[in-house]
Image (spheres, rainbow, N blue to C red):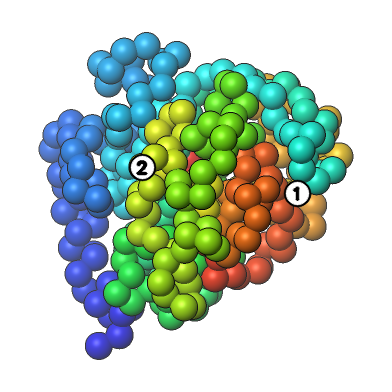
């Protein structure tokens, strides 16, 4: 029996069960087995009774009933976006302010992407080739268009480039998600990769010491992550100071975060950015979603 058929038979029941549970109560179990309140658009920490919306709650999650993903609150704030330490496309450092938003704590997994594929018939990828027996690993070989389709199905969106970098670096503009000092043991990269010879990822969340200030995991390493934005050095340097939405058009999309095949630490910094064609599918690139 193929992996696709297994997914379509078992996961559809999980989807229906999650939705039913979400309709009945305030809490549900995530795809990782953790309890949290059901997430919906417009929700904030104050509405959940957690406290002020101006704070991060790195140990608390809300759960997306569509795919079971765990979401973290990223409070409104500002930071110095960009860096003078990397390639020219990271310059200049410019001040950006963002409204509060939700971010998936982990990269989208093979198991979650299987739910999407079973529900929609999505076939524009060979992601299954690397997925069997690796359900908790991040999905790979997904194009930008496929990533956007997943996000729309899950009722969320791809993060903007500014949202992604803010979640990774925080108000202090840390070099890496965990701080300014490099540590080769706090992420999955070439010199600390998984054992699979084709795709050297770890299961998502395997490096809790690499968490960012808001609690997000694997923002450095494991897989590169698609952002919503078109890639444009010009726009990047002159973007709006508040909630920059990204350029209206372009030729390539933004990819962030380093991956298991990153050989150099410079590629795992929070400011590192890569231009990638929309249709490109890679064994080192996946996605993470965001919501308002």
Q: Is residue 233 left or right of residue 261?
A: right
Q: Secondary structure at mark 2?
A: helix
Q: Earlier in the sequence, mark 1 or mark 2?
A: 2
Q: Secondary structure under badge 1?
A: loop
Residue shown at 53%/61% (left/top)? 191
Residue 7 visible in the snapshot: yes
Please name whichever residue, 85 or 82, is drawn nearer the observer in this view of the structure.
85
Looking at the rendered structure, the number of numbered marks drawn on it comes to 2
Residue 231 numbered tag:
1
In this picture, residue 52 sits left or right of residue 248: left
Placement of 232 over or under 39, stated as above or below: below
Among the 4 quarters of the image, the one containing residue 15: bottom left
| Residue 149 pos. (x, y %) | 51, 58
Q: Which residue is mark 2?
A: 208
Q: Is residue 282 above or below residue 209?
A: below
Determine whether 96 is above or below 23 in the image: above
- State the residue at coordinates (40%, 33%): 215
**The N terminus lies in quadrant:** bottom left
Q: Residue at x 29, y 74 (%)?
A: 133
Residue at x-position 42% and y-position 38%: 211
* Mark 1–mark 2 distance (CA, rounded to whole Å): 30 Å
Q: Is residue 23 above or below residue 150?
A: above
**Residue 96 x %, y %:** 68, 23
Within 10 Å of disc 1 (Cα), the crowding (few <14, some 14-19, many 20+) is many
Say if residue 145 shows up in the picture: no
Q: Are marks 1 and 2 in contact (CB under 8 Å)?
A: no
Residue 7 picture location, percent across and down: 27, 72
């Amino acid at each position: 029996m193929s992996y696709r058929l297994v997914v379509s038979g078992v996961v559809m029941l999980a989807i229906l069960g999650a939705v039913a549970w979400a309709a009945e109560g305030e809490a549900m179990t995530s795809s990782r087995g953790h309890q949290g309140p059901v997430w919906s658009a417009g929700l904030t920490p104050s509405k959940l009774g957690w406290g002020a919306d101006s704070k991060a709650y790195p140990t608390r999650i809300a759960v997306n009933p569509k795919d079971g993903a765990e979401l973290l609150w990223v409070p409104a704030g500002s930071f110095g976006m960009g860096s003078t330490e990397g390639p020219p496309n990271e310059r200049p450092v410019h001040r950006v302010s963002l409204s509060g938003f939700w971010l998936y704590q982990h990269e989208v997994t093979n198991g979650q992407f299987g739910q999407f594929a079973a529900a929609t018939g999505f076939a524009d990828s060979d992601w299954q080739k690397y997925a069997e027996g690796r359900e908790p690993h991040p999905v790979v070989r997904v194009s930008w268009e496929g990533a956007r389709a997943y996000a729309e199905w899950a009722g969320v969106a791809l993060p903007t480039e500014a949202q992604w970098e803010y979640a990774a670096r925080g108000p202090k503009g840390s070099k890496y998600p965990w701080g300014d000092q490099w540590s080769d043991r706090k992420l999955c990269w070439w010199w600390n990769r998984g054992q699979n010879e084709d795709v050297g990822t770890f299961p998502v969340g395997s490096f809790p010491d690499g968490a960012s200030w808001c609690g997000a995991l694997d923002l450095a390493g494991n897989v590169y992550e698609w952002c919503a934005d078109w890639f444009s050095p010009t726009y990047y340097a002159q973007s709006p100071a508040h909630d920059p939405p990204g350029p209206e058009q372009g030729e390539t999309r933004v990819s962030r975060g380093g991956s298991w095949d990153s050989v150099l630490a410079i590629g795992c910094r929070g400011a590192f950015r890569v231009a990638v064609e929309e249709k490109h599918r890679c064994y080192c690139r996946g996605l993470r979603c965001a919501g308002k």
